């Protein structure tokens, strides 16, 4: 089921158009990554969706509501740089946020306990937030954003400022969270998107240059790849392989060569034969597919 439909969304800052007419639809209980380089327009888009900023043009229609309706109860939002009251405990903060979002005192307490468990900070609930790690603060922020059971939770760069441990905790939480609600999160880190999301929206200079499920993007853009690493400069060996099988392209970086091939099975047999027959000084043979990062570079260079 659709949660929100965005049509021809535009935003100007003074005369400068930073969002140039984007369209997309978000489905229930999916995790969607809004991907883009710095300045692509991610924060601007998320702020319009969360109701914090008015679009210059276009429509944001939440299912079950009409244009002009107040849709804030349907969304939860965690800004890029959330601010907490460090003197409050995690439990106090969530109970307070629950009451602010309209829950009764009793419901707020009940939901707080449920969320403390869901986000994994139950044990630290009576500790002051000032003593929490970055990952714990971010998980508390996510709990706050979903306290009123929104249909869509919007997270602006939720893992960018975290160390690898914090990052892992939050990514795992996002994976669990999509059972409850749709998640839209922005990032410029492609691995994070690849790890948790079902769909991707690629934003580039204020336009959506590509979108789809991970599977659709892989089918459309990803190619099979064989990486070879030699003990010495790889350039001298490239021709031995390109002459062999249908190699679509290759890239040489000092001791390494990446070959993009059409038929991975055929290429694998041919490559291994050449390596064995000529006893080439190989240190690594790896079969993979182009990463999302390579897909992204390809899409934005179009
Ligand atoms: N209040 C503002 N006034 C004028 N221009 C702005 C304003 N806020 C953002 N911009 C410009 O709009 C463009 C998009 O900014 P936005 O913050 O939405 O991008 P972003 O993709 O979130 O980038 P980042 O990853 O750096 O946060 C940028 O060129 C930015 O300089």
Image (spheres, rainbow, N blue to C red):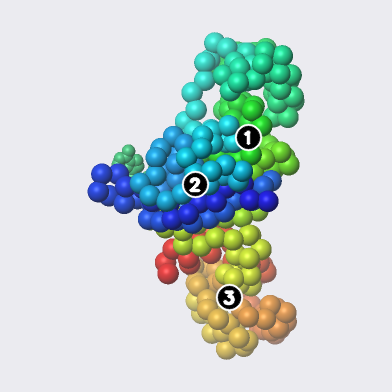
Image quadrant in which the C terminus is located: bottom left
Residue at the (55%, 51%) spot, across then down: 5
In the displayed structure image, the side of residue 192 where residue 161 appears, left or right: left
The reply to whether residue 38 is visible in this rendering is: no
Residue at the location (38% across, 49% down)? 57
Q: Closer to the N terminus: mark 2 or mark 3?
A: 2
Query: Outermost residue toward the bottom?
Result: 243
Quarter of the view holding residue 247? bottom right
Disc 2 marks which residue? 60
Could you tell me which secondary element the residue under label 2 belongs to? strand
Q: Earlier in the sequence, mark 1 or mark 2?
A: 2
Q: Quadrant of residue 220?
A: bottom right
Question: From the viewer's perspective, is the residue at label 2 or at label 3 nearer?
Answer: 2
The number of discs equals 3
- Real-space Cα separation, disc 2 to disc 3, in angstroms: 41 Å
* Residue receiving disc 3: 260
Looking at the image, which is closer to me, 66 or 218? 66
User: Where 91 sits versus 118, above or below?
Assistant: above
Q: Quadrant of ligand 1?
A: top left
**Foreground of the two, 75 or 81:** 75
Q: Secondary structure at mark 1?
A: loop
Q: Residues within 10 Å of mark 1 (few under 14, many from 20)?
A: some
* Residue shown at 57% from the left, 36% from the top: 75
For the residues bearing labels 2 and 3, Cβ distance under 8 angstroms = no
Q: CA distance from mark 1 to mark 3?
A: 44 Å
Q: Does 174 appear above or below 280?
A: above
């Amino acid at each position: 089921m659709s949660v929100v439909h965005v049509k021809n969304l535009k935003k100007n800052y003074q005369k400068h158009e930073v969002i140039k007419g984007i369209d997309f639809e978000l489905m229930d209980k999916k995790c969607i990554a809004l991907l883009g380089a710095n300045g692509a327009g991610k924060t601007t888009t998320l702020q319009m969706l969360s109701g914090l900023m008015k679009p210059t043009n276009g429509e944001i229609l939440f299912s079950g509501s009409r244009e002009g309706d107040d849709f804030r109860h349907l969304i939860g939002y965690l800004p890029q740089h959330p601010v907490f009251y460090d003197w409050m405990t995690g439990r106090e903060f969530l109970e307070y946020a629950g009451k602010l979002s309209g829950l009764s005192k009793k419901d707020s307490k009940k939901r707080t306990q449920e969320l403390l468990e869901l986000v994994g900070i139950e044990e630290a609930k009576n500790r002051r937030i000032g003593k929490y790690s970055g990952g714990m603060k971010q998980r508390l922020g996510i709990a706050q954003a979903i306290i009123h059971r929104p249909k869509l939770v919007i997270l602006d760069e939720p893992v960018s400022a975290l160390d690898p441990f914090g990052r892992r905790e939050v990514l795992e939480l996002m994976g669990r969270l999509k059972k409850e609600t749709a998640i839209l999160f922005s990032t410029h880190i492609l691995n994070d998107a690849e790890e948790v999301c079902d769909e991707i929206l690629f934003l580039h200079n204020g336009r959506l240059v590509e979108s789809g499920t991970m599977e659709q993007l892989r089918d459309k853009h990803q190619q099979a790849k064989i990486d070879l690493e030699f003990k010495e400069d790889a350039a001298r060996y490239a021709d031995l392989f390109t002459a062999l099988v249908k190699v679509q392209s290759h890239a040489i970086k000092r001791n390494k060569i990446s070959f993009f091939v059409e038929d991975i099975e055929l290429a694998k047999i041919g490559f291994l034969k050449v390596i064995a027959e000529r006893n080439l000084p190989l240190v690594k043979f790896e079969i993979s597919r182009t990463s999302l990062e390579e897909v992204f570079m390809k899409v934005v260079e179009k």
